[in-house]
Image (tube, rainbow, N blue to C red):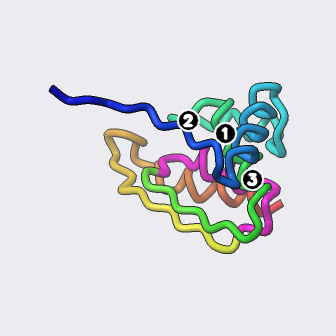
Amino acid sequence: MIEIKEQVYVEHEQIELVRAALEMAKEEISGIPEYALQIPGMSGIVYRRFINNYIRTLEAPKYLEIGTSFGSTLISSMFGNEHVKSVLSMDLWIEKKVGPYGKQIFFHNCESFLNK
């Protein structure tokens, strides 16, 4: 029989930052404008707001995303967070998943939303 134990971390320095970022996201507060939240993607709007809020609290964050598709999560995490030290994004842009222009749409979205 497999035993699963729930472990709650209460002493890590990031816990309050994560809680605050999540509460703000639930209250629809973030640095992402509404029009940027309309990019199609797999992540929900609350998560997009959360990751944007959380990254804003970090000193010199580095961001890695695997499975970028059209860039909805990557753009949400980076929007207004110019202090991010580096970003690495990966995707195969498989045509069955994102259509024949998925990669071009990703780059267009990044240029449109992050180069303002």
Q: Residue furthest bottom?
A: 85
Labels 1 & 2 near each other (Cβ < 8 A): yes
The answer to which of marks 1 and 2 sits earlier in the sequence is 2
Residue 112, above or below 48 = below
Question: What residue did someone put label 1 on?
Answer: 48
Q: Nearer the viewer, residue 95 or 69?
A: 69
- Which residue sits at x=33%, y=49%? 94
Distance, label 3 to label 2, CA atoms, is 17 Å
Residue 104, above or below 60 = above
Distance, label 3 to label 1, CA atoms, is 14 Å
Q: Amino acid at mark 2?
A: Ser
- Which residue sits at x=20%, y=29%? 2
Left-right relation of 80 to 22: right
Mark 2 crowdedness (10 Å alpha carbons): few <14, some 14-19, many ≥20? few
Mark 1 crowdedness (10 Å alpha carbons): few <14, some 14-19, many ≥20? many
Region rendered in magenta: 68-84
Distance, label 1 to label 2, CA atoms, is 7 Å
Question: What residue did someone put label 2 on?
Answer: 43
